[in-house]
Amino acid sequence: MRTSRVALAAAVLAGATAIGFGVSIGTASADTFAALPIKSFGDIAVDGVHKRVFVSDPTTGKIVATDFRGRSVGELGGLTGVDGLALSADSNLLYAAVRGANKVVAVSTTTVTASDSYELGASVRLTDVAAPVNGKLWFSGEVAVLTGGFGSIDLATRAVQVHDNAVDGISFSAGARLFTGTSAPGLLVLAETAMSAGNSAVYDISSGAETLKLKTDWLNEAVLDLDLTGEGTRLLPVTYNGVRSIDLADGAQQRIFNDLRFFGAADVAHDGRIAVGVHNTTDAADVHVYQDGAATAEKTFSLGLRDIADHGLAWEPGGSILFAVSDSGDFRLHVLNDPTSSPDDTPSGPPLELHMNFIGAPLTAPRNVPLTFSGFILAAGNIPLPAGSELTVTRTDMESPAGRSLGTVRTDADGMFPVADTPTSGGAVRYTFAYAGSTRFAPMTGDWTVEVSRGKTSLTLARSPQPAVYTYGSTVTLSAKLGATYKNRSVEFWADPYGADQPARLLKRVTVDAAGRATATIKPTRTTAVSARFTGDPGYLPTSVGFTLLTRVNASTALSRHYKTAKIGKTTYQFFRKSKDPLITQTMTPHPGRKVRTIIEYYSGGKWRLWSGRETRLSTTGKASFTFVTGVRVGRKFRVRAEYIPGKAGDSLNYGTQGAWKYFTYTK
């Protein structure tokens, strides 16, 4: 049964004192939100006696029961295709149309368990159900192939009686639904909900028989919801394009609520107020409450960025609370205008765990430019924090590595919160949002990091002197010049000698002068990469510049066992007796595993020619000696030198080096 989900329970509560609305300017948010554990929405029924809300889920075949705060109090499954719901007059039983089993199941509203069931038999395929009147339970369904109708079940005898449509001359589609109203419990409305249909009829069933009062149509529009108002004198069918008020006495009709569009639901309170739900996925009003006959809503509610479910409105019987079901891929129960509402009511069970996400949050942003994005914080089932919940905001950046407070932000009805800031520091800027927790929600912290742009400065590096290759241990002066920066005016000089045995090391950190200049010196002993580095600051990116100082080894040769030194022409020679073999000693900068190459040449035919070449491993002190034995004739001229050849020497730490020649000859 689709409208008046309060059903006949209003009769039991007719003497209750109503709590009315005050006229409100603007749109209110729902007092309470709760996720519904359903995959689809069939119908809603409100039990004012036991303070419970029942929702059917045709897809999973179950009925979910909650209290008036949306907290689960029970669930009944195994009801394949369960759809329409109707409460008994005393609210002790909930009747559910279980379409998949073709039966009506009676459910205890206190235990949420099945207490009875009523089979319809093979002649009827069930669609909907309405509450019992005069001992008869009413239903609608397919009574013949592609033909809809309605009938009743005698609760005493369980006899099924199908109404004869031919008596009234009315033809219904198989998907016709039932509607009743609290103001006229003896009236039953049958309406087609298919777009291609539109027939409807109002019957008086107060006597136990079915007497046609009115036949009408909705111009081939599907009926999404329907209710009776004005002590049962007017019919309010809801279609997507509008709501009509139809006089049951003469069928006269007119459109109402013409300031709204895209309708989805309506329900009439016990005091005649009308709640209307419209499809709207912005934060504008979704639910509008009117006094009967008024053209302007006295109060409106926003469901946030969510959409009202078709026929998803139901008043509290005899009270002021209005319940709404929203459908935005998931389903939520909203409690509207609850005078006892607390934004953070004490729950049963442990606090709900929260998660946080961000919308429109950039990964990069320019410095000193306003930055805006949004976040949202929800519990499982997309349950938001109460509107107005506070989150503290902290910004951590290069200027405030320990964090700087940006105050607080507050959530809206959907758990959304705004973020607005102008980052003055470049680099990684982290925004941290912390919720302190409550009795219902656990504490939670989330963050978002934005890479804020920084400028590029200039940095140059020069050397003096500037030979192509440096002699071992010579002094080199490094000169750096730094361009504009934000706060950091220092330059670091670094040296990285070739080889894995020596890491890069800081030579000097210097604050530049007014012209941006700084100097440092180095005495390289092996080929070394040198650089000047600006480590960056909140306004400018780090940068570096460098080059490599190619450096020779120390290499020399010494001869011993000679008897004199003299010049032959302009060249100095060492003279050996033919009976004495020269001792050649090579000296080179030592390194583990290093070898020196010895080149010996002889003079013949007017030019120097290779006599021999050999590699000898150096000692730990950088020495290598051997005796040169030749057996050559007196007068032969020789020369010898030490060489370092990268790779062949056992390492490549230095630039290729050739030592000075040593000249020698033999005499008798």
Image: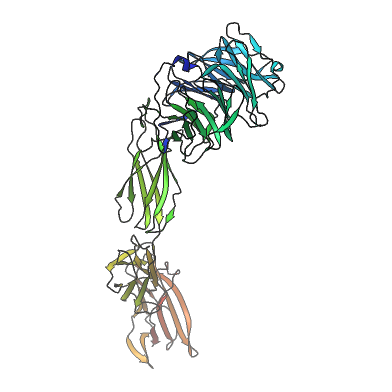
Q: Quadrant of the C terminus?
A: bottom left
Q: Is residue 73 left or right of residue 403?
A: right
Q: Is residue 101 above or below residue 424?
A: above
Residue sticking out furthest to the top: 157
Rendering quarter of residue 513: bottom left
Q: Is residue 497 left or right of residue 514?
A: right
Residue 218 image position (x, y, % from top left): 63, 30
* Number of marks: 0
User: Which residue occupies the foreground of this view, 594 or 549?
Assistant: 549
Percent x, y of residue 154 = 60, 9
* 658 vs 600, nearest the viewer: 658
Q: Residue furthest bottom?
A: 569
Residue at (29%, 66%) from the top-left corner? 490
Indicate whether 73 appears above or below 597: above
- In this rendered view, identify the residue nearer to me: 641 or 568: 641
* 662 vs 588: above or below: below
Residue 585 location, quadrant: bottom left
